[in-house]
Amino acid sequence: MNKFKYYAPTEVIFGKDVENEVGKELLKSEATKVLIHYGSERAVKSGLLDRVLDSMEENEIEYVMLGGVVPNPRLAKVREGIKICKDENVDFVLAVGGGSVLDSAKAIAYGAVYNGDVWDFYEGKEIIKGALPHGNIITLAATGSETSSSSVITNEETGDKVGVNTDYGRPEFTLMNPELTYTLPPYQTACGIVDIMMHTFERYFSPGGLNDMTDEIAEAVIRNTKKYGSIAMETPEDYDARSELFWSGSISHVNLTGLGRTGDWASHRLEHELSGMFDVAHGAGLSAIWGAWARYTYKEAPERFIRMGEKAWELDLVNLQEKEAVEIMIDTVLKYFKGLGMPINTTELLGRQLSEEEILKLADNASKAGSRTLGNFKVLNREDMINIFRMSV
Ligand code: NZQ
Ligand code: ZN
């Protein structure tokens, strides 16, 4: 096995009605004044926020509220939250919603203890050296942000969508009630399924020697997500399917599926350019770009695709030529995405073909005008990124 460090300090509280425990959890975290951060009014109308407020009041915890987070969460909302935290002496940030709300809450937590502008962290000008403690009630199985170290924010003025990773991003707790995900529209459920799979692929298709336990976990996450993803699409109120997806989402991004490997992350970076420029859903951007990435890079280690095809997608690839086996594996994944109603190229994603000018701009942004490469499975330079975007149409 390769060297690795595994750190996952978030307390996970999973099951029906766990959101009602939020007050107790906040007391354990010694929160006295909490910013409750959420997205649309759905959180209010569904009654979820009422239950949260009841629990806070029972435990005599003060709070202020800030809603209005949108998918691909915006910097302006983060700055608004930071100002509230500073003005109101908030000492804990509680996110109630999907990955976008959680990422916005993390950014607020970083900015609330910093004197400069929070975007400094996302631009890489400053390193995060502290944060308000934060926790969440997650309502969407997808990003794994509920236990991950990441936060991804869009600067609406520049169109830049950037992620930062820091251990300060690890939530103190996550309350995961699978029933809260019953109301997800099929499109969002499907985006989540793709994202969970992609967090696993990004780690699996990357350099590293034998680390079989990690590979086995990754293959199990894919098998499970495929099986229960299909059930959740058919029967949105199937508790077991929603549970399995939810937990797979956390496992997929807490790095258990990538220990001892460097991780690739090129598909994610290319997708962040797509969602930064076109405001598309993250999962849809991933399903649109992955096929092109896979076909462009597979020669680096075709045996990884074949192993993944056999062990996770249960394909019989014995006695096939390498190229044919890999093609079958890639096609199988894309057919699965398509069956979920996800786009499998950028033309389907946008409803029109990417123009050559847009392709160049996407590659320029992703490569910072040719000054940075992406990925580790195959290191991609600007030309490679252009080729992948061209192949993705
Ligand atoms: O505003 P609300 O009403 O919450 O609506 C959301 C939103 O419209 C809705 N939704 C959430 N839970 C729901 C629900 N609708 C009905 N029932 C529920 N239970 O779903 C829509 C999408 O929500 P969003 O939070 O944007 O989706 P997701 O969780 O997929 O998050 C996507 C964002 O996370 C980033 C993505 O780039 C994107 O910006 N990522 C964050 C990561 C991380 N922090 O670790 C890793 C990922 O790779 C990803 O990059
Ligand atoms: Zn993702």
Image (cartoon, rainbow, N blue to C red):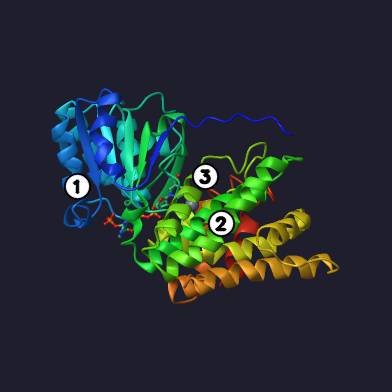
> Where is residue 203 drawn, in percent x and y?
62, 46
- Label whose residue precedes the other's in the sequence (1 or 3): 1
Q: What element carries label 2?
A: helix
Residue topped by disc 2: 224
> Where is residue 189 drawn, in percent x and y?
41, 62
Residue topped by disc 1: 49
* Cβ–Cβ under 8 Å for marks 2 and 3: no
Residue 181 as seen in the image, left or right of residue 216 = left
Q: Nearer the viewer, mark 2 or mark 3?
A: 2
- Label whose residue precedes the other's in the sequence (1 or 2): 1
Up-down relation of residue 269 to residue 59 (above or below)? below
Tell me the quarter of the image containing the N terminus.
top right
Query: In this orientation, which residue lies closer to the viewer: 324 or 236?
Result: 236
Number of residue marks: 3
Residue topped by disc 3: 251
- If the picture is divided into quarters, which one holds ligand 1? bottom left
Q: Quadrant of residue 209?
A: top right
Up-down relation of residue 77 to residue 314 (above or below)? above
Q: Quadrant of residue 281?
A: bottom left
